[in-house]
Structures are given as structure tokens and as C-alpha cells.
Amino acid sequence: MRSGDRPGRVIFLNGTSSAGKTTLARAIQDESGTPFVYWGIDTLFSLVPPNWGGGRDGPLSRDGFWYDRTDGDTDGHPSVIVRYGEVGRRMLRSARTAAAAFARGGDDLVIDELLLTPDLLPEWLDALSGLEVLLVRVTCPLAVAEERERGRRNPPGLARGHHRMVHDHGVPYDLTVDSTTGSPAELARAVLRRQPSGRTH
């Protein structure tokens, strides 16, 4: 543990799918002089049994996590939203507790999050209460996110589906990062230099 048994700092990255969060999180790990533990929403999804979804539309995914493809965009583009049921909500709560435990144990922590619903940010901040949290909005033009999406295994429309809602939580950010405006290393150094606003979480 660090000197004085102090808790670790937390960098919380939030943005739509393919906005550049994971690349930025990994760059933060590379550029920091202290070790940052990585926790992402895909960390949770990798732990979810296939029958309960984890983004894979299992037979019990309506209780866990599932892809909602019913709300097509008005201009005809595919739009996909990750939904969750009661089991999924419980797993999200457990994930917040697990992630926060690293920082409470003295480890620096970078969180790579796509807020599935706006109410999840206040719940995250409750889980991180008493910790130094830098809240970072990660963004890029939607066209860029969709171009990245086409090169990945994500379903088409995931970036568009969450593009508007992911930041609709009413909590001010400490910093906004457009992932197209610099190299991952440059952006990571800018994030690491930035101090939190000082508000109590």
C-alpha cells in the first residue's frame, strides 16, 4: 500500500461504445508513474455466464444483459442499446463494489465505463464515496465511433444507441477528452495532470 495507507485515486472514463475509452485507459496505465488497476464494463461482461447475456443474448439474458435492437434510428441507421434485468442490476452493483475495493485498498484505479442508464452514475459515485475521483467524458464524432465499430466484434449500432444517453446524467465532468484530438499517450498525460474538482463523492 502507498505511504500512510491512503486510498488510491480513481479516474472514471465514461463514453459511448468505440469512443476510445479502453485505448485511453490502457495509455493511462502506460504513462502513469504509479500502477493503475483497470476495471471496465467488459470486465464484468466477461464474468457473466452466457445464459444470462454478457452481451451475448443468452436464453436468460432478459434477467441479465441483452441487446435491444427495437429502436431503429430515424435515418435508418441501426441502433442498439444494452439493457439489463434484475440479475444484471445486481451484478452491476457488485461490480461497483469490487472496483471500489481496489482504490480503498490503496491502488490507483482507472474505470472504463459505458453507463447503460443515467441513474448508474450516482450509484457509482456512492460506491466511490470518500475517494478522489476524476470524472472524464470521453467522446469523438459519432462517424468516427461507427467507423471503429465496423472494425470490431461489437454489433453495428451500439455506438449510436448509447451516443446520446451515455452523458445524460446531470453530473458535471472534471474533464472532456475527444479521442481524435491527440495520441493516446498525449491524452493520457493530460488526464493524469488534471486534478479532480474537489466535490465530495
Image (cartoon, grey):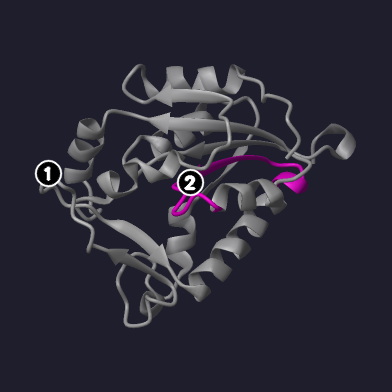
Kind of element beneath mark 1 = loop
Residue located beneath label 2 in the image: 113
The Cα–Cα distance between marks 2 and 1, rounded to whole angstroms, is: 27 Å
Q: What residue sits 28% from the left and 45% below the top? A: 159
Residue located beneath label 1 in the image: 75
For residue 66, above or below residue 173: below
Q: What residue sits 48% from the left and 36% below the top? A: 25
User: Quick one: label 2 or label 1, which is nearer the N terminus?
Assistant: 1
Quadrant position of the N terminus in the picture: top right
Magenta segment:
102-119
Kind of element beneath mark 2 = strand
For residue 148, above or below residue 84: above
Residue neighbourhood size for the residue with mark 2, other residues' Cα within 10 Å, grouped as few (<14), some (14–19), many (≥20) = many
- The amino acid marked with disc number 2 is Glu
- The amino acid marked with disc number 1 is Asp
Q: What residue sits 27% from the left and 51% below the top? A: 158
Coordinates of residue 49 in the picture (x, y in percent):
43, 75
Is residue 151 visible to us here? no
